[in-house]
Image (cartoon, rainbow, N blue to C red):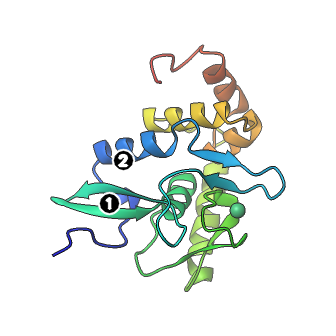
Amino acid sequence: MDTVSLTISFYDLEQEEQFYLLRRFLAPGIVEINSKTGCHELQKYLDVKGYGRLQAWHDGTKKSLKLHRLAFEFFNETKIPSNLAILHNCDNRKCVNPAHLSTGTLAENIKDCVAKGRNSKGSRNGNNKLNEAQVTAIKRLLDGGMSRVKIAKLYGVYDTTIGNIARGRTWRHVA
Ligand SMILES: [Zn+2]
């Protein structure tokens, strides 16, 4: 029997496995931004169909995670039900730009949840607390050239919070 099963949520994983995936996903050189299309194109981890995949352990078995689903979940801080498809609006399978991804069936329902999540994030006035995994991701995004304002919006924090990370005034101990 093949121990690799199909869809699992990033948020079903133990934190150690999440970190392991994020370290590999957000490592330098893995994603390149296509300046024409705005696609964030994976340079590695592509399966035969052209989707990015990484494997992680869950409940004693290896699970395969599609990276565009992981990107959608991670950046929207939402768990996708396994029966829902995540569609590429750009028709580019190796793209992991959360802005190019949307849910398939039951779309309205989920979009609504995500929209509400975003709104509640905004209403917290940028006072969100970051964790180490998020700071690691933020540092990768900064290295990749994403603007501080955009990153601040993604994470629901103040621009100055991102600026402080960029200048090494906070979170210096996080790589
Ligand atoms: Zn794209």
Task: Name the residue at the bottom extreme.
Answer: 105
- Name the quarter showing ligand 1: bottom right
**Residue at left 54%, top 62%?**
68
Give x and y (percent) for residue 73: 50, 59
Disc number lying in front (2 or 1): 2
Within 8 Å of ligand 1, the CB of disc 1?
no
Q: Judging from the image, what secondary structure is the residue with disc 2 in?
A: helix
Disc number at residue 66?
none
User: Toward which corner of the image does residue 139 lie, by quadrant?
Assistant: top right
Task: Name the residue at the right extreme.
Answer: 36
Whether residue 166 appears in this view of the structure is yes
Disc number at residue 18?
2
Disc number at residue 12?
1
User: Alpha carbon of mark 2 to alpha carbon of mark 1: how far?
Assistant: 9 Å
**Residue at left 47%, top 24%?**
175
Badge 1: few (under 14), some or many (20 or more) residues near its Cα, within 10 Å?
A: few
Does 40 sit above or below residue 151? below
Q: Quick one: 137 or 29, which is closer to the camera?
A: 29
Does 165 sit above or below residue 142? above
Q: Judging from the image, what secondary structure is the residue with disc 1 in?
A: helix
Give x and y (percent) for residue 101: 64, 67
Quarter containing the N terminus: bottom left
**Residue at left 20%, top 72%?**
2
Badge 2: few (under 14), some or many (20 or more) residues near its Cα, within 10 Å?
A: some
Label 1 sits on what residue type?
Answer: Asp
Within 8 Å of ligand 1, the CB of disc 2?
no
Label 2 sits on what residue type?
Answer: Gln
